[in-house]
């Protein structure tokens, strides 16, 4: 019987117990699903008449697709701005200068602590005086998503850079790199891989939080699909909620799959990258004879 440090192969009794628990879990889940189905059926929610609008092309053309485009538009713009905001303020919080580090920390903590819905309302009512004209709902939603999620991503960036072993930066300094080179060429490339799951998780949260634009009448998937569409087709509220929920699940799964693909590709590119070959007797990065050995070589290999 093979064993490992973290897992013991179950014996006969354990296998029987695990099988019984599995059957019990399946029965429990099946019971819950049946009760949901029966509850919907009792209220005629499976009637083909109320699902029929979702089989029409005009329903998707005039309601769901415009809302989906609005959701993707707000999420894409807010995600790019939040990543930039997070990178800038995350690195600012790592600065050696107090006049940069302390204000950056204050900004991050303030916007991370304010409820997102309150932030959306606040910016929405200030938008006419701040921006003069334009789509106030879009501006308020994107700005609030950028500030809130960017503040969370700033903490992710700071933690990711600090998680890189200290020896990496020490090795880079030993070959004569300046601080900005160490950060750009050594620390950030390693930190990005460690940060990727947290970044993807926050971007998924950002995508779902675009639904809060419903409160300020932003034309998104929730507004058109869950408010306007049921008003046009009476009785289709529950079917609309189910269809919209499935679309959101699909969007989040696609985003996660894309991030996983990018992470695997970045891992492969770093593994296959060849280090530079220095001429005999030449120094690595021009620091001096033998500077490319030991800890210095480790930093250069990491940089590549």
Image (cartoon, rainbow, N blue to C red):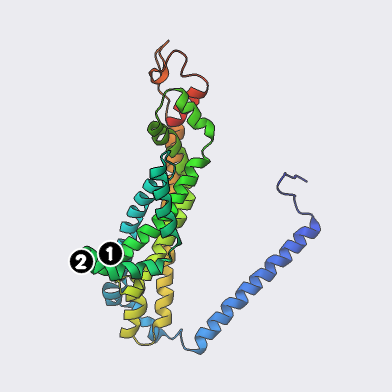
* Near-viewer residue (93 or 191): 93
Q: Which residue is mark 1?
A: 139
Q: Is residue 144 above or below residue 245?
A: above
* Near-viewer residue (109 or 230): 109
Task: Check contact, mark 2 vs mark 1: CB within 8 A.
Answer: yes
| Label 1 neighbour load within 10 Å: few <14, some 14-19, many 20+ | some
Residue 16 is left or right of residue 303, and the answer is right
Q: Estimate the x, y position of residue 44 in percent, counting from the top left.
A: 47, 88
Q: What residue is shown at x 50% (from left), y 19% (from top)?
A: 293
- Residue 256 in view: no
Q: Which residue is mark 2?
A: 134
The label shown at residue 177 is none
Residue 271 is left or right of residue 229, and the answer is right
Q: Residue furthest front?
A: 99
Q: Estimate the x, y position of residue 141 in percent, counting from the top left.
A: 32, 65
Q: CA distance from mark 2 to mark 1?
A: 8 Å
Residue 207 is left or right of residue 13, and the answer is left
**Element under disc 1:** helix
């Amino acid at each position: 019987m093979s064993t490992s440090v973290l897992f013991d192969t179950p014996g006969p009794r354990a296998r029987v117990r695990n099988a019984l628990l599995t059957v019990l879990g399946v029965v429990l889940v099946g019971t819950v699903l049946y009760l949901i189905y029966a509850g919907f059926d009792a209220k005629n929610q499976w009637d083909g008449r109320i699902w029929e609008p979702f089989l029409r092309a005009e329903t998707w053309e005039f309601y769901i697709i415009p809302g989906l485009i609005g959701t993707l538009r707000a999420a894409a713009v807010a995600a790019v701005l939040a990543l930039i905001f997070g990178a800038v303020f995350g690195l600012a919080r790592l600065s050696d200068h107090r006049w940069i580090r302390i204000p950056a920390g204050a900004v991050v903590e303030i916007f991370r602590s304010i409820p997102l819905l309150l932030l959306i309302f606040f910016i929405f009512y200030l938008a006419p005086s701040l921006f003069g004209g334009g789509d106030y709902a879009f501006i308020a939603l994107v700005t609030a998503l950028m500030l809130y999620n960017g503040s969370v991503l700033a903490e992710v960036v700071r933690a990711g850079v600090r998680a890189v072993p200290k020896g990496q930066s020490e090795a880079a300094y030993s070959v004569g790199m300046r601080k900005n080179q160490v950060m750009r060429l050594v620390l950030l490339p390693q930190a990005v891989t460690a940060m990727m799951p947290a970044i993807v998780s926050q971007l998924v949260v950002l995508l779902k939080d675009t639904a809060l634009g419903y409160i300020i009448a932003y034309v998104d998937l929730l507004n058109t699909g869950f408010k306007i569409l049921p008003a046009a087709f009476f009785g289709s509220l529950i079917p609309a909620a189910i269809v919209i929920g499935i679309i959101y699940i699909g969007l989040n799964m696609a985003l996660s799959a894309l991030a996983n693909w990018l992470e695997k590709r970045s891992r492969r590119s770093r593994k296959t990258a060849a280090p530079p070959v220095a001429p005999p007797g030449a120094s690595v990065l021009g620091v001096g004879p033998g500077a490319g050995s030991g800890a210095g070589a480790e930093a250069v290999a990491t940089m590549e």
